[in-house]
Amino acid sequence: MLFFRKRFKLVIHTVRLMNDQQLIAHLHEKGFKVTPQRLAICKSVLSSREHPTVEQVYETVKIKYPTLSLATVYQTLHLLTQIGLLQELGSSDVSSRYDPNSSPHLNIICKKCGKIQDYKSETIINFISQITLELKHPIIGQNLEIYTYCCKCEK
């Protein structure tokens, strides 16, 4: 199902998911404690293709862990951002959203409903590669956004 206009070639990214043991090892390596709640938060957001908000992650994980606090979700998403497993997508008119896809891509955002889709193409990859060459420093993160109206909202 195409979400945005057909003139955009959409590529749904495949998130390279770590298994539980790899994720736990990675968090320990970075000096972070791993609780069942933190692991559930990590798995929820890292497997999402929806660019969830803190509140959406909280509502999802709270089903299994009813004593979970919103602060724990904020802290965990912040640490995932710090260690490079997640990118925070900020906007002045909505809550921050989180993107587990760190490969070069655009985020196509519907200006009305806020739905976000990843758009990846050779042009984008070449563009980011060229910027990296010109900067002479590795890029440690990127956030490129295009605003439009999805097919549903355009009607």
Image (tube, rainbow, N blue to C red):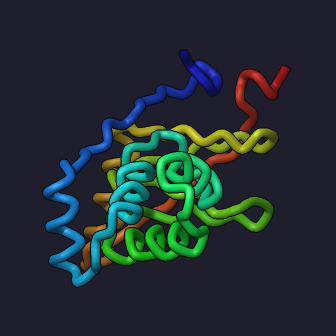
Q: Where does the image place residue 19, in percent across and percent down from the top left?
A: 19, 48
Horizontal side, residue 138 vs residue 2: left or right? left
- Point out the image quarter for the N terminus: top right
Q: Which quadrant of the structure image shows residue 154?
A: top right
Q: Is residue 105 something one can see in this rendering?
A: yes
Horizontal side, residue 89 vs residue 25: left or right? right
Looking at the image, residue 74 lies above or below residue 9: below
Horizontal side, residue 58 vs residue 13: left or right? right
Horizontal side, residue 16 vs residue 59: left or right? left
- Point out the image quarter for the C terminus: top right
Q: Residue at x 47, y 68 (%)?
A: 77
- Please state the total of marks drawn on the protein image: 0
Farthest-out residue, front: 67
Q: Where does the image place residue 81, in percent across and percent down from the top left?
A: 41, 71
Q: Residue at x 28, y 78 (%)?
A: 33
Q: Where does the image place residue 28, in percent across and percent down from the top left?
A: 19, 76
Farthest-out residue, bottom: 31
Q: Looking at this view, is 86 or 31 the one in front?
A: 31
Looking at the image, residue 144 lies above or below residue 90: above
Q: Where does the image place residue 36, in percent across and percent down from the top left?
A: 34, 61
Q: Is residue 104 something one can see in this rendering?
A: no
Q: Residue at x 54, y 28 (%)?
A: 8
Farthest-out residue, right: 155
Q: Residue at x 38, y 69 (%)?
A: 80
Q: Looking at this view, is 37 or 117 the one in front?
A: 37
Q: Looking at this view, is 5 or 68 the one in front?
A: 68
